[in-house]
Image: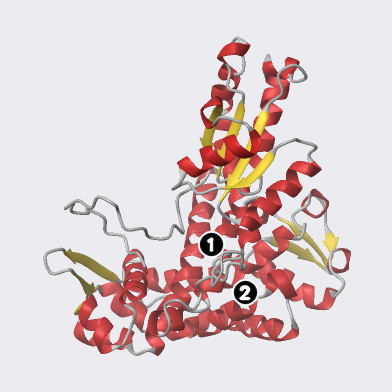
């Protein structure tokens, strides 16, 4: 059984893995452009000078450098009066910059992993995985005794870049089912290509997620911990279409991933994977709202909302959860024939709407699933009234998403406000 200290440590490992998934391709792109050597040699540099010297897109370059700051390799100072950012290389940064070449194979692996949702793992990807596993077992030639803190950080990044796409692929394809998690199994029980699947299982065994006996594998407590949190990797891995194009975004065309038409599939993210990941992560928070829902829908019927609108409905998980709570734990649930519950799922992304609609149909829940923009509540209200005869104000409005990927719109009434943010945006 895992101790609290074990669980805390493994949670930290998940975050370090996700750091690696983003840091490895970012650092390698900057390294290949010669920018890392420039930072090593000059110690202190400014964003505008770097963008000019390396013909880089300033917004994306700023994000890349901010990522290195998040790892403790650079420090950052916002020079507001000069509209610039100053970066200084830290002691840990100097040590890490000498190891960045070790990311190369893991980033090659990510170049294959970006196609896993559509193509699965092909022989070329497995060949790269073999090389990654062999070099990982030798710590990529890194002497951990020399700068142990940074060495372990870089190796954890590499581990994360390798394992993150694997755990998402396995999770989305049903491998973390109780059938496999509660008893020993053989590779051929899950995969039609057991010999190649063994390569994946052997790497996870190397990470001490499985105990292997002869030709059978069994999850151990550490492996179960990570398997049960597979969705925690989903959102970050879903952005591999962006993370594998950083050379172009930073040093080439900044619009290479921009949708050309509104109905075109998104280029920068695997949306269904993103919805899968965020849906799993949200379940804990959904339960926190239960008391509010129960209190509201236990009131006299004239004081209750007519229904619930979920802005940013993702995969429809919250709508399903809310309906279940209302149906089984409230007075409203006893009178749904006389006072039907109007459920509305709204999302900006059409792929998310497709997933929500399919999940609600499967759950036999009646709901309206429509497109909407959090930045245009007026349009949402108009659409609801004109298309369905429902007033937005009659519904309990809930938001179950984080604002992100919003296209910049110039304020109609700009003010001379000074931002205190240290974030980087493009």
Residue 152 position, x and y percent, is 44, 70
Left or right of 318 in this view: 86: left
Name the outermost residue toward the front: 386
**Circle on res. 236:** 1
> How many numbered circles are shown?
2
**Circle on res. 114:** 2
Mark 1, residues whose alpha carbon is within 10 Å: few (<14), some, or many (≥20)? many
Residue at 53% x, 62% y is 236
The numbered mark, 1 or 2, whose residue comes first in the sequence reads 2
Asked whether 155 or 366 is in front, the reply is: 366
Q: CA distance from mark 1 to mark 2?
A: 12 Å
Residue 283 position, x and y percent, is 61, 40
Residue 296 position, x and y percent, is 56, 18
**Circle on res. 403:** none
Relative to 316, does residue 273 appear above or below in the rendering?
below
Asked whether 50 or 92 is in front, the reply is: 50
């Amino acid at each position: 059984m895992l101790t609290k200290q074990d669980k805390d440590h493994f949670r930290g490992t998940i975050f370090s893995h996700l750091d690696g998934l983003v840091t490895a391709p970012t650092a390698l792109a900057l390294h290949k452009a010669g920018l890392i050597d420039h930072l090593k040699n000059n110690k202190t540099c400014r964003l505008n000078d770097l963008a000019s010297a390396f013909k880089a897109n300033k917004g994306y370059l700023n994000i890349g450098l901010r990522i290195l700051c998040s790892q403790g390799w650079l420090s950052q100072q916002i020079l507001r009066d000069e509209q610039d950012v100053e970066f200084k290389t830290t002691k840990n940064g100097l040590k890490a910059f000498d190891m960045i070449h070790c990311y190369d194979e893991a980033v090659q692996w990510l170049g294959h992993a970006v196609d896993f949702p559509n193509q699965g793992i092909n022989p070329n990807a497995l060949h790269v995985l073999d090389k990654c596993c062999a070099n990982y077992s030798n710590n990529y030639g890194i002497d951990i005794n020399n700068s142990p803190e940074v060495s372990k950080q870089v190796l954890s990044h590499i581990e994360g870049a390798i394992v993150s796409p694997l755990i998402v692929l396995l999770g989305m394809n049903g491998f973390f089912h109780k059938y496999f998690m509660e008893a020993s199994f053989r590779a051929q029980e899950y995969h039609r290509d057991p010999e190649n699947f063994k390569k994946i299982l052997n790497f996870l065994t190397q990470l001490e997620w499985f105990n292997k006996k002869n030709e059978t594998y069994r999850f151990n407590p550490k492996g179960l911990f990570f398997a049960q949190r597979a969705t925690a990797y989903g959102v970050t891995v879903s952005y591999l279409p962006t993370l594998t194009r950083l050379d172009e975004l930073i040093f080439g065309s900044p619009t290479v991933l921009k949708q050309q038409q509104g109905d075109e599939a998104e280029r920068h993210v695997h949306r269904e994977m993103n919805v899968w990941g965020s849906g799993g992560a949200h379940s804990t928070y959904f339960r926190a709202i239960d008391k509010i829902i129960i209190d509201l829908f236990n009131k006299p019927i004239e004081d209750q909302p007519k229904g619930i609108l979920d802005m940013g409905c993702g995969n429809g998980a919250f709508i399903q959860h809310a309906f279940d709570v209302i149906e089984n734990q409230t007075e409203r649930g006893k009178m749904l024939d006389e006072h039907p519950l109007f459920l509305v799922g709204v999302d900006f992304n059409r792929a998310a709407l497709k997933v929500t609609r399919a999940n609600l149909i499967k759950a036999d829940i009646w709901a309206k699933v429509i497109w909407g923009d959090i930045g245009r509540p007026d349009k949402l209200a108009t659409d609801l009234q004109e298309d369905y005869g429902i007033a937005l104000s009659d519904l309990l409005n809930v938001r179950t998403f984080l604002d992100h990927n919003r296209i910049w719109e110039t304020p109609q009434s700009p003010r001379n406000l000074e931002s205190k943010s240290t974030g980087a945006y493009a």
